[in-house]
Every structure is written in structure tokens, then in C-alpha cells.
């Protein structure tokens, strides 16, 4: 028996991936409604803070620290959600994001960088980092990466 069209489209994505896509669609709808709003940036930032506040345990602790580090290191980046995750934008594109471990049932949270990040180092370089805890050494490394990403 062949799969229905709906099964073939969604059969390749996990429930978590489908949920993230739905969150992204909702973010796009909210963005449309806010277009031209004087406090769009404040509303976007509040959405991000609400997402962080809704996280549990270690994910929330890590997300709060990542948020504090990124906003201090690169205040020019605009905080906003991206696929339901905290992200930081430049020129309308997500440059850096935090992926909570629970979002995709992963072993660790992830600090990731997209194409707009200028982390280029030769022919190969890392664009994501596993996070389990953030101490002083990790804070320094994250700040350095973010500064490099936006330079």
C-alpha cells in the first residue's frame, strides 16, 4: 500500500521537527502582524525572553547565560526566536542561536552559528558547539566566538 501524500511529506520529519516548523510559521505570522510597529524589536525580544523562561532546568540556566553573554558581547544583534529557539539576528537573518537539549531530545544543548557568522577559518571550521555547563572559560569562549561572528 502506498503512503498518502500527507504521510510522504511528514514521514521524513520527527514530531519535534514538525513542531519546530509550526513554531517558525507562527513566528512569521507574528512578524507580519508587527511589521511597521514601533515596538517590534521590543516584542521580538520579549518573545525570546518568554521562550527562555518556559524552558526547564539546565536548558533554562544555559539559555539565560547564553543570552546574557551574547547581548553583552554583541548588543547590535537583535534577539528574536527562530524555530522556537532563542536566536540573535543581523540584517534580518539569524546569526547565532541556542538550541535547548529538550527541543530535539538531545544529550546536550547547542550554540550554533549560521552563514551570516564570520567564523571562517580556512576550508573547514565549526559552526555549532555542544553545551552542558557554562563556566568562566566557556563564557569567555562564547563571547569571543560571538565577537568574531559579527566582525
Image (cartoon, rainbow, N blue to C red):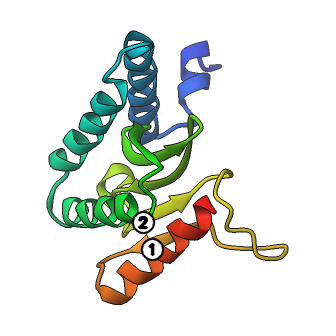
Q: Are marks 1 and 2 in contact (CB under 8 Å)?
A: yes
Q: Is residue 12 above or below residue 145?
A: above
Q: Position of residue 37 (x, y in %)?
A: 36, 15
- Give the residue at the far right of this rendering: 123
Residue 101: which quarter of the image? bottom left
Answer with left or right where residue 8 lies relative to residue 69: right
Residue 7 or 120: which is nearer the viewer? 120
Q: Position of residue 13 (x, y in %)?
A: 52, 37
Q: Is residue 140 above or below residue 41?
A: below
The image quadrant where one finds the N terminus is top right
Element marked by disc 1? helix
Q: Nearer the viewer, mark 1 or mark 2?
A: 2
Q: What's the residue at 39%, 52% (across, down)?
A: 104
Residue 130 or 139: which is nearer the viewer? 139
In the picture of the structure, the residue carrying the numbered disc 1 is 142
Q: What's the residue at 20%, 59% (across, down)?
A: 60
- Can you tell which mark lies on residue 95? none
Answer with left or right where residue 65 lies relative to residue 72: left
- Give the residue at the far bottom of this rendering: 137
Q: Position of residue 108 (x, y in %)?
A: 37, 69
Q: Position of residue 102 (x, y in %)?
A: 30, 55
The answer to which of marks 1 and 2 sits earlier in the sequence is 2
In the picture of the structure, the residue carrying the numbered disc 2 is 73
Q: Residues within 10 Å of mark 1 (few under 14, many from 20)?
A: some
Residue 68: which quarter of the image? bottom left
Q: CA distance from mark 1 to mark 2?
A: 9 Å
Amino acid at each position: 500500500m502506498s503512503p498518502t501524500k500527507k504521510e510522504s511529506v511528514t514521514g521524513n520529519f520527527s514530531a519535534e521537527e514538525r513542531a519546530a516548523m509550526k513554531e517558525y510559521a507562527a513566528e512569521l505570522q507574528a512578524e507580519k502582524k508587527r511589521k511597521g510597529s514601533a515596538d517590534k524589536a521590543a516584542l521580538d525580544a520579549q518573545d525570546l525572553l518568554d521562550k527562555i523562561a518556559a524552558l526547564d532546568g539546565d536548558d533554562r540556566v544555559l539559555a539565560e547565560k547564553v543570552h546574557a553573554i551574547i547581548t553583552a558581547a554583541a548588543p547590535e544583534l537583535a534577539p528574536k526566536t527562530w524555530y522556537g529557539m532563542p536566536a540573535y539576528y543581523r540584517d534580518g537573518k539569524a546569526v547565532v542561536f541556542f538550541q535547548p537539549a529538550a527541543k530535539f531530545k538531545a544529550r546536550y544543548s547547542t550554540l550554533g552559528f549560521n552563514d551570516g557568522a564570520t567564523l571562517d577559518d580556512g576550508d573547514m571550521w565549526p559552526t555549532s558547539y555542544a553545551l552542558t555547563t557554562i563556566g568562566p572559560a566557556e563564557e569567555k569562549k562564547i563571547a569571543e566566538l560571538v565577537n568574531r561572528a559579527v566582525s
